[in-house]
Amino acid sequence: MTNGEKRHDRRVTYPCEVECTGAGANPLNPRISDLSSSGAFIDSMMAVPVGTRFAVRFVLPSGPIQLNAEVVHSMEHFGMGVRFVDVTPEQHNLLEEVVQAHD
């Protein structure tokens, strides 16, 4: 991990549409650009404040997945980094399968 790098898990390019629901989660045409087993970067013109929690729903090769997310990095007109919270072991395994498939 480089100086200033906060990611612990390997991220892969995984562009897909994402639905965000919950308090303050109304980004315009959001898309995931990269994904790890612990989080993602959501491209969006509208970002929400750090600490905001909301649900995300997107499609993995195995099917749809819904997770809770918390914003850890926010850049207006660019997007936001989120970490997944309250992830079940099954959800973690599904996410890890995607990361491993991009090796």
Image (cartoon, grey):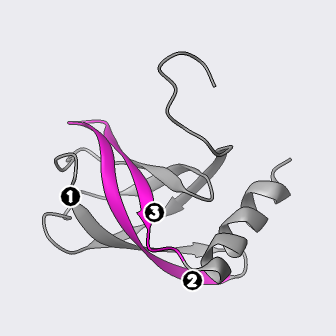
Q: Helix, strand, or loop for circle 2?
A: strand
**Drawn side of residue 17 relative to residue 22, left or right:** right
| Label 2 or label 1, whichever comes before in sequence order | 1
> Picture coordinates of residue 93 (x, y %)?
72, 73
**Residue 65, located in which quarter of the rendered image?**
bottom right
Q: Amino acid at mark 3?
A: Phe
**Drawn side of residue 26 relative to residue 32, left or right:** left
**Residue 77, located in which quarter of the rendered image?**
top left
Instruction: Tell me what residue is drawn at x 57 percent, y 75 percent.
Output: 59
| Label 3 or label 2, whichever comes before in sequence order | 2
Q: Helix, strand, or loop for circle 1?
A: loop
Residue beneath disc 3? 84
**Drawn side of residue 66 relative to residue 53, left or right:** right
Give me the C-alpha separation between circle 2 and circle 1: 23 Å
| Residue range (magenta) | 63-87
Residue beneath disc 2? 64
Magenta-drawn stretch contains 75:
yes
Residue beneath disc 1? 52
Instruction: Tell me what residue is drawn at x 70 percent, y 74 percent.
Output: 94
> Picture coordinates of residue 31 (x, y %)?
43, 56
Res. 40 mark: none
Q: Nearer the viewer, mark 3 or mark 2?
A: 3
**Drawn side of residue 18 relative to residue 52, left or right:** right
Question: Considering only vertical position in the picture, is 4 above or below 13?
Answer: above
Instruction: Tell me what residue is drawn at x 47 percent, y 64 percent.
Output: 17
Q: Amino acid at mark 1?
A: Thr
**Residue 18, located in which quarter of the rendered image?**
bottom left
